[in-house]
Image (cartoon, grey):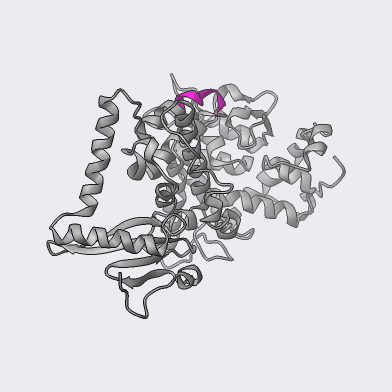
Amino acid sequence: MAYDKGRLNAKQVEATDKPGHHADGKGLYLQVSKWGTKSWVFKFTLGGRTRGMGLGPIDELSLKKAREEVERLRVMVREGRDPIEERAEQRRKLKAKYEDDGGKVMLFKDAIAKAHARKEGEFSSEKHRKDWRSSLDAYAVPTLGNMDVAHITHQDVLRVLNQPVDEAGGTLWETKTDTATRLRGRIESVLSWATVSGFRTGDNPARWAGNLKELLPKPSKVSKVTKQPALSQADFPKWFAELRKLRGMATRCLEFAVLCASRSGEVRGATWDEIDLDARIWKIPGARMKMERDHRIPLSDEAVALLKATPRVSGSPYVFPAVRGGALSDMSLSATMRRMQEAATKNGGKGWIDPDSGRPAVPHGLRSTFRVYCAERGVDRDMAELCLAHSVGSSVERAYQRSDMVERRRALMSEWAAFCHGKETAENVVLLRGAM
């Protein structure tokens, strides 16, 4: 088999790291991804249509073998046969043969349901249970759903993790790294279930160590910590005053979230049986918390007044129910802030923006405003972190320190409420420092 000079050689295949397609000749290309992974592609034209056919990674197919495969495929094309369609037909026949012979065949989309059912007892909350399934349905099923789990390879998993998710061509692994990392683990769980259930054999192609770790950059190298846009201390009381002028359940929900420095999901899922108005405490069960442990929030006078003014909806356990029943959606709070921003900029104003990024503030960024408030007033770090329901100290420290300082935090939340309402004065600023 004669190839002209200037074609690729084994050393070039090993050394080439420039992303793109590098021609070897006769339709064979070395494909290098932006992450440095390399595979072979055969490009051919049939019936006026040019197509690309993946042949496999270079560690499974040498340059010599790739050239031999291309020669075979070129013969098929000259005969008017489509190698991509014939490969798909072979797979369909193989699947049919397994079924006719009584062999076990399991499609990935069906394996998800089976694996999901077996994991029911492991989910920390209803949200966790839904997220586990929805991420697979959204990102993995379009690519792997109709594949027999027995035939899924690490290249198939890479196609899922490297799928483009924005107009700029950014991949899932690059732009939504946390989501992609969890997705990889869930694909691994589904394929592990398939293996122990007898539907596939061999290594798990979604395994990280000694497998995808060699083909993808570490999540810590590509994950970008993006700060949620927050309001400045100077703008916050003005923004809060505008918020209180608005009507609607989502508006009151957002107001309560601010007064409690809580996450959107915690407030939207709040039920009346979690709240003790006499003790002025809101106790959120661990099943609804990010850190998976109970969290008590001392309620300020302003928070109690808001709750007393909120009507209870018959048949709904939620403090802030949606119009059609159930909990409010996350978008409802975001929509409230977007409307406030639109109203503030209608006459040429800058609106409610983050002073650092210049981006409009969002619900989660309001917790950052609270944290800055604490820092600028010398509030004890551990107390501020407890207010935000963050982990404080090492696991050993947490094992010995079991106080949540709820009464000390009560004074802080009262001061915060006064600040939100524009009532803070130099005389009522309290420095809440001290050992736990």
Range covered by the magenta-colored residues: 116-122
Report whether residue 145 is seen.
Answer: yes
Instruction: State the predominant SS element of the stretch in magenta.
Output: helix
Tell me if 60 is positioned left or right of 82 in this view.
right
Q: Position of residue 398 (x, y in %)?
A: 79, 36
Quarter of the rendering occupied by the C terminus: top right
Residue that protrudes farthest toward the top in the picture: 315
Q: Position of residue 99 (x, y in %)?
A: 28, 27
Q: Position of residue 201 (x, y in %)?
A: 45, 34
Q: Residue, x 59% and y 28% (percent of image)? A: 287
Residue 121 covered by magenta stretch: yes
Looking at the image, which is closer to me, 100 or 173? Answer: 100
Report whether residue 327 is seen.
Answer: no
**Relative vertical location of residue 191 with respect to residue 33 in this rendering, above or below:** above
Tell me if 42 is positioned left or right of 78 in this view.
right
Q: Residue, x 52% and y 31% (percent of image)? A: 269
Residue 168 covered by magenta stretch: no
Q: Residue, x 49% and y 72% (percent of image)? A: 11
